[in-house]
Image (spheres, rainbow, N blue to C red):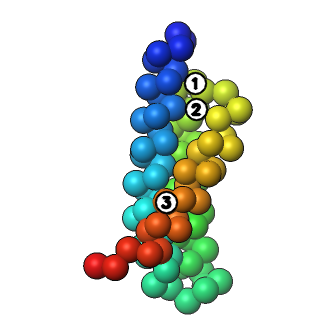
Amino acid sequence: MDVSSRTVAIVTICLITFVLNLFFGYFRAREKKFSFKWFLCIHLPIPLVAFARLYAQLDYVVIPLFLIVAVAGQIMGGKVEI
């Protein structure tokens, strides 16, 4: 995979990760802390992001970047007021 297509794949997966965790972070903030639903809201996006990374054939070295983006999405999703 050349550098430009790898960069596009990383940015695309970062956007998907952020939006997905924004959605789950919104619902996590409205659940009782440490409940089963709260736990699911944190952990359900992980397999989806992992599948996207594997499908794009990206190395494990980008996992910390995706983790940072996921945490940012969870935090910002928890602060959204609709």
Residue of label 2: 54
Look at the image and tell me whether residue 47 can be seen. Answer: no
Residue of label 3: 73
* Residue under the image location 58 percent in, 59 percent down: 71
Q: Secondary structure at mark 3?
A: helix
> x, y (%) of residue 37?
53, 79
- Does residue 32 sit above or below 29 in this rendering? below
Q: Secondary structure at mark 2?
A: helix
What's the distance in space between the residues labelled 2 and 3, CA to CA? 21 Å
Q: Quadrant of the N terminus?
A: top right
Left/right of residue 60 with respect to residue 26 in the rendered view: right
N-terminal label among 2 and 3: 2
Query: Which mark is nearer the camera, 3 or 1?
Result: 3
* Residue under the image location 46 percent in, 17 percent down: 5
* Viewer-side residue, 30 vs 46: 30
Residue of label 1: 57
The local crowd at label 2, few if under 14, some if 14 to 19, many if 20 or more residues have their Cα within 10 Å, is few
Look at the image and tell me whether residue 46 can be seen. Answer: yes
- Does residue 15 sit above or below 79 in this rendering? above
- Does residue 29 sit above or below 70 in this rendering? below
